[in-house]
Amino acid sequence: MSSVSVKNIIKTYNKGEVKAVNDTSFEVAKGELFGLIGPDGAGKTSIFRILTTLLLADSGTATVEGFDVVKDYKEIQNIVGYMPGRFSLYQDLTVEENLSFFATVFGTTIEDNYELIKDIYEQIKPFSSRRAGKLSGGMKQKLALCCALIHKPKVLFLDEPTTGVDVVSRKEFWDMLGKLKKQGITIVVSTPYMDEATLCDRIALIQNGSIMSIDTPGNIINNFPKALFAAKADNIYKLLQDLRAEAEVESCYASGEYTRFTMGHGQLTTDNVKSRLIESGHKNLVIKKIIPGIEDCFIRLMNS
């Protein structure tokens, strides 16, 4: 039996005009670290709220640990931990007061499940008497995770937990998730950061409420169907325009200091393209073949 099962879920807003979740289905295995990967507005938060019984779907079914999200909502609330995207703890309470409050709500104590949160809590313990609203972004994140874990949930839902957090705190957070996974907790995490996708066991790439692909990050990358090239020159904007004007260039988009592109099935080669770009006046032109990442796969699926 899957830990989380979603079947043909549809959720609309504004009297059906906005389809936030569009006939979405996926399964999450017990003990798996599963990622919902997509930009803001892709439908990730709506899915999380449905799975944590905070929102009713228009149609479709979903279960968590075998419990139906509609019929068995009380059972689900006792076995899941939920960390919403926006910091939602009591900002006027101290770190320790917040943690004690959430432990009491679930009929437990900090001491009962301290081993589960120990590695995380030790990092914020020096600030235990500080009000939550006065913590840094990284510390707020750790406190929210402790509160979501204090009742020892079977499934942990984390909605964009690293958004707005510095790079070091992001890495620390994912290291903590790896340790939690080893304790048998099923973790479902959403993120707009494509680089975090590779840290999951499996991922679902989601856009406009629809899942475009579900697989391991490695398999999704390996299924990229074309050779991918990166190009840069002194005038990156003109380079992007000129590449898009080439009939043999199939797709082209900006990525950092490079323009990435794939070729069509015609006779023109990258050497031909390079020669024509140099003739067009591009200086310090560099074109190289690169290995695609999750972001490249996402863009290709989105435009297909």
Image (cartoon, helix red, strand yellow):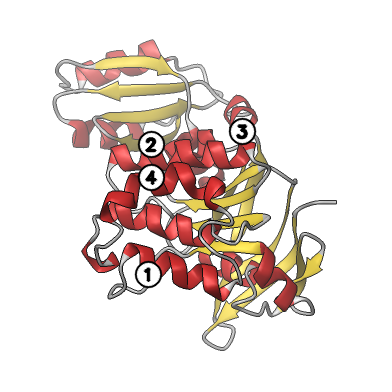
Quarter assignment of residue 93:
bottom left
- State the residue at coordinates (52%, 35%): 199
Q: CA distance from mark 3 to mark 2?
A: 23 Å
Q: Quadrant of the C terminus?
A: top right
Pick the front one: 67 or 208: 67
Q: CA distance from mark 4 to mark 1?
A: 16 Å
Residue farthest top in this picture? 271
The residue carrying mark 4 is 122
Task: Check disc 2 and give the amino acid type.
Answer: Lys
Task: Check disc 3 and give the amino acid type.
Answer: Ile
The residue carrying mark 3 is 220
Q: CA distance from mark 4 to mark 3?
A: 37 Å
Q: Position of residue 255 (x, y in %)?
A: 32, 35
Q: Position of residue 82 (x, y in %)?
A: 54, 63
Task: Check disc 4 and give the amino acid type.
Answer: Glu
Q: Are marks 1 and 3 in contact (CB under 8 Å)?
A: no
- State the residue at coordinates (29%, 13%): 275
Q: Position of residue 301 (x, y in %)?
A: 56, 43
Residue 171, numbered label: 2
Label 1 crowd bin: few (<14), some (14–19), many (20+), radius 10 Å: some
Give the mark nearer the N terminus: 4 vs 1: 1
Q: CA distance from mark 2 to mark 1?
A: 27 Å
Give the mark nearer the N terminus: 4 vs 3: 4
The residue carrying mark 1 is 97
Give the mark nearer the N terminus: 1 vs 3: 1
